[in-house]
Image (cartoon, grey):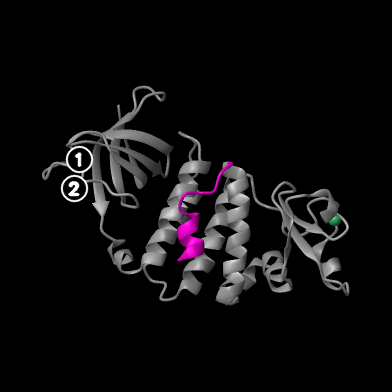
Amino acid sequence: MLTKDMAICIRAVDYSETSQIVTLFTRDTGKIGAIAKGSKRLKSTFDGPIEILSHGQILFADSNKDTLATLTEFQQEPTLLNLRKNLFALYCCYFAAELVNGLIHDYDPHPELFESFLQFLQNAGRHETRHGMLAALILFQLGLLNEIGLQPVLTHCANCKTKYEYRASSIEHQVYFSSSANGLVCRDCEINFADKIRLSKDVATCLTNLKQIPASTEEILAEIEKVMVLHLTELFGRPPRMAKHIMGS
Ligand SMILES: [Zn+2]
């Protein structure tokens, strides 16, 4: 039986001279691995070779969820072309695709995440500055973690539950982030977490009030993204492949 769905390609590798194996994040089916036979031929039902980040309507057959599905059609939509002109935005999109691929399980649908991922990709080409792109990336990452139940605790100490607002008024403003605590930890608790890092006041203020992210400086956003990468490295058990391009470029 053929299934119709909307999909974003999050990974594509050559399988043979004419075919590809692709990983697709679909709206209603979730993540699927599929073989696209003949996708590299000039004339195919895939609108040309399937590239990572391409999106559109697909038709596929999955007779057995343990094996690759067979992609029979991919009507690719050409909205992301201007990304090629903005390398940083392109890296951020590859990074987002890598995170979706690494954190979402096969055949586990997340339609809201699909919509926010698509919107993230469509807006990526429009950010004129690194600042706007970084803000969008941070919010996308937090949304992704939230969707899979791994949202870091940012409103209070993840260990003793003391509300952050209370701490903010203290003279010595010290807030830490610990991946093993899954969120912010206060100065009374930080000693229990060997992996903690101390946050600057601006970063802590921004993380506890995410509405401030779009209005924060690029410097603060870069520092927050560093925290996100540390956290994702912990979740993945290794640094995400694209992270060095985000932090180093
Ligand atoms: Zn605490």
Q: Position of residue 73 (x, y in %)?
A: 23, 40
- Graded by Cα atoms within 10 Å as few (under 14), some (14 to 19) or many (20 or more), the crowding at tag 2 reads some
Q: Secondary structure at mark 2?
A: loop
Rendered image quadrant of residue 228: bottom right
- Graded by Cα atoms within 10 Å as few (under 14), some (14 to 19) or many (20 or more), the crowding at tag 1 reads many
Observer able to see residue 139: yes
Q: Nearer the viewer, residue 249 or 90?
A: 249
Q: Position of residue 191 (x, y in %)?
A: 84, 53
Q: Are marks 1 and 2 in contact (CB under 8 Å)?
A: yes
Taking the image as shown, residue 62 lies to the left or right of residue 169, namely left
The stretch in magenta equals 237-249
Between the C-alphas of marks 1 and 2, the distance is 6 Å
Q: Quadrant of the N terminus?
A: top left
Residue 164: assigned label? none
Taking the image as shown, residue 196 lies to the left or right of residue 78, namely right
Q: Position of residue 183 (x, y in %)?
A: 72, 54
Picture quarter with ligand 1 = bottom right
Observer able to see residue 161: no
Residue type beneath disc 1 = Ser
Q: Secondary structure at mark 1?
A: loop
Residue type beneath disc 2 = Gly
Q: Quadrant of the C terminus?
A: bottom left
* Tag 1 residue: 39
* Tag 2 residue: 48
Q: Residue at x 31, y 52 (%)?
A: 54
Ligand 1 near label 1 (Cβ, under 8 Å)?
no
Rendered image quadrant of residue 203: bottom right
Determine if the magenta segment contains residue 145.
Answer: no
Q: Residue at x 37, y 22 (%)?
A: 64
